[in-house]
Structures are given as C-alpha cells and as structure tokens.
Image (spheres, rainbow, N blue to C red):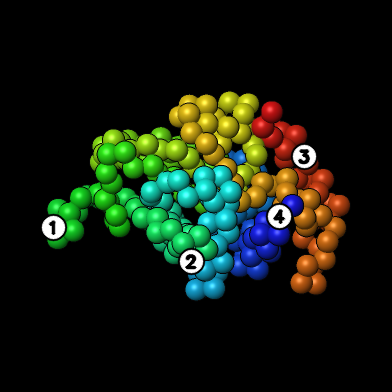
C-alpha cells in the first residue's frame, strides 16, 4: 500500500471523519462504519486532504485535465484544497469550479462558482464518497448545460465497495453508465487491512469483533 494511503487513513481517524460503531445510513442500511467528510474543519486537515486527493488524481490522470469540479456543498472545499495542492506538488494550475444550489441573478451571476467552463475542457469531478451515484446524475446535466465539456473522471476519498443500484459497487456503475474513469484515494478493504488488530493512538479500532461486523455487512451489501 502506498505511503500516502496509509497517511490518509490515519488522517480520517485523527479528524474523526471515519468512525466505527453502529450507524444508520441514508439508504437505511445499518453500517458498522461511517464516513463524514464534514469533519475536516481545520487548515491542517484541509491541506493534507488536498495533498492526498492531488496525489490520487495525479496517479489516475497525470496533468492532462483542466478543471476540478466539486459539487455543492461538500465538494467545494475539496476542489479548492486540491487545486492548491496540485499546483504546489505538480506545478500545474488546474482551475476549480463548483455549482450553487440556487442560480444567482446579480453580481457574479449564474449557477457556477470559481472558474467558468469552456467547450473542450477536460473535467474531473471530486467528491467525498459515492454510494448510489445520485449526485453524479445531478452533476452531469449541470456541467453539460454550461459548455461542451469532456468529463473524464470522478475521484472520491473512500470507496465503500458496496452495492449501488445493481450488484456492482457505485463507482463501477458510474464507469459503466457514463463511460468515465473512477477512483478513490483508498478502498474500505485497504482501511481494514491497515487498521485490523493494529494499535493506533492507544486504541485498536478494528479488533476481531469489529472485523466480524464489517465482514457480515459486506456479506449482505458488498459488491460482486
């Protein structure tokens, strides 16, 4: 496992973004783990987060794209932090863009924040986590209404590796439906591999009991 992935898992734990216990998801599923990207709240958290996203995006796309699009609301700080990190790490200025929930009709008018979009722009969408693909269904029309852009990919922080609408995981479904490349900084399998029976900051987050609960969850909801 790459070093930046290990560091990212530790960041999720340190910032209380990744929790283990019993949680009810929006889908109604009872999950033994939960991720809340809204818990990245400090400058150091966002700086590191941007770096890990930038490294994962660079691994997938190199520097051959123009715009990072972060859907409102959680995607906005992700896009901003990552464009800064991408410039510092790889010496290329990528533009950031996001959408408003409501169209602004005065001043900086329109639905977009940040950069405008031009015909031919290569766009990578950046999100925290995708479980159903619903946000992508909403994002694609927004992008296509602004310009004839080329959406080349989606990057999330954690691939939960559970079924979406079919037996495939949500990222695989998006690849199939939209024909774009998808990726994640880490997968849940990598998280379990790294934390299982490992003491971190005086705690073992995934002991045998938690591991059995995670295994049971994937037995029921895991992607084929």
Q: SS for tag 4?
A: loop
Above or below, comparing residue 107 to residue 202 in the picture: above
| Residue that label 3 marks | 216
For residue 133, side relative to residue 123 (left or right) = right
For residue 128, side relative to residue 100 (left or right) = right
Q: Is residue 150 visible?
A: yes
| Residue that label 2 marks | 88
Locate residue 164: give its quadrant. Answer: top right
| Mark 2 neighbour density, 10 Å: few (under 14) some (14–19) many (20 or more) | few
- How far apart marks 3 and 4 lie (CA) works out to 27 Å
Q: Quadrant of the C terminus?
A: top right
Question: How far across and how far down the image is residue 157, in percent?
Answer: 57, 51
| Residue that label 4 marks | 2
Of 147 and 108, nearer the camera is 147
The label on residue 106 is 1
Along the polypeptide, which appears first: circle 2 or circle 1?
2
Question: How far across and how far down the image is residue 166, in percent?
Answer: 58, 26
- How far apart marks 2 and 3 lie (CA) works out to 42 Å
Q: Residue furthest front?
A: 91
Residue shown at the point (47%, 50%) measured from the top left: 63
For residue 210, side relative to residue 62 (left or right) = right
Name the mark nearer the viewer: 2 or 3.
2
| Mark 4 neighbour density, 10 Å: few (under 14) some (14–19) many (20 or more) | few
Along the polypeptide, which appears first: circle 2 or circle 3?
2
- How far apart marks 2 and 1 lie (CA) works out to 34 Å
Q: Are marks 3 and 4 in contact (CB under 8 Å)?
A: no
Name the mark nearer the viewer: 2 or 1.
2
Residue shown at the point (45%, 46%) measured from the top left: 64
Along the polypeptide, which appears first: circle 1 or circle 4?
4
- How far apart marks 3 and 1 lie (CA) works out to 53 Å
Residue shown at the point (62%, 40%) measured from the top left: 29
């Amino acid at each position: 496992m790459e070093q930046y992935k290990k560091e990212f898992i530790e960041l999720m734990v340190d910032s209380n973004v990744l929790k283990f216990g019993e949680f009810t998801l929006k889908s109604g599923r009872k999950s033994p783990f939960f991720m809340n990207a809204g818990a990245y709240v400090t400058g150091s958290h966002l700086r590191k987060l941007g770096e890990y996203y930038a490294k994962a995006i660079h691994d997938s796309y190199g520097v051959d794209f123009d715009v990072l699009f972060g859907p409102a609301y959680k995607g906005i700080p992700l896009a901003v932090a990552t464009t800064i990190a991408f410039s510092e790490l790889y010496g290329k200025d990528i533009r950031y863009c996001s959408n408003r929930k409501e169209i602004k009709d005065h001043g900086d008018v329109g639905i977009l924040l940040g950069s405008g979009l031009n015909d031919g722009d290569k766009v990578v969408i950046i999100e925290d986590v995708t479980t159903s693909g619903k946000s992508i269904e909403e994002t694609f029309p927004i992008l296509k209404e602004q310009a004839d852009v080329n959406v080349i990919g989606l990057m999330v922080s954690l691939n939960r590796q559970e079924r979406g609408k079919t037996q495939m995981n949500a990222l695989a479904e998006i690849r199939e439906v939209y024909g774009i490349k998808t990726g994640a900084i880490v997968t849940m399998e990598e998280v379990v591999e790294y934390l299982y029976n490992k003491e971190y900051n005086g705690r073992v987050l995934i002991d045998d009991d938690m591991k059995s609960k995670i295994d049971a969850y994937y037995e029921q909801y895991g992607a084929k």
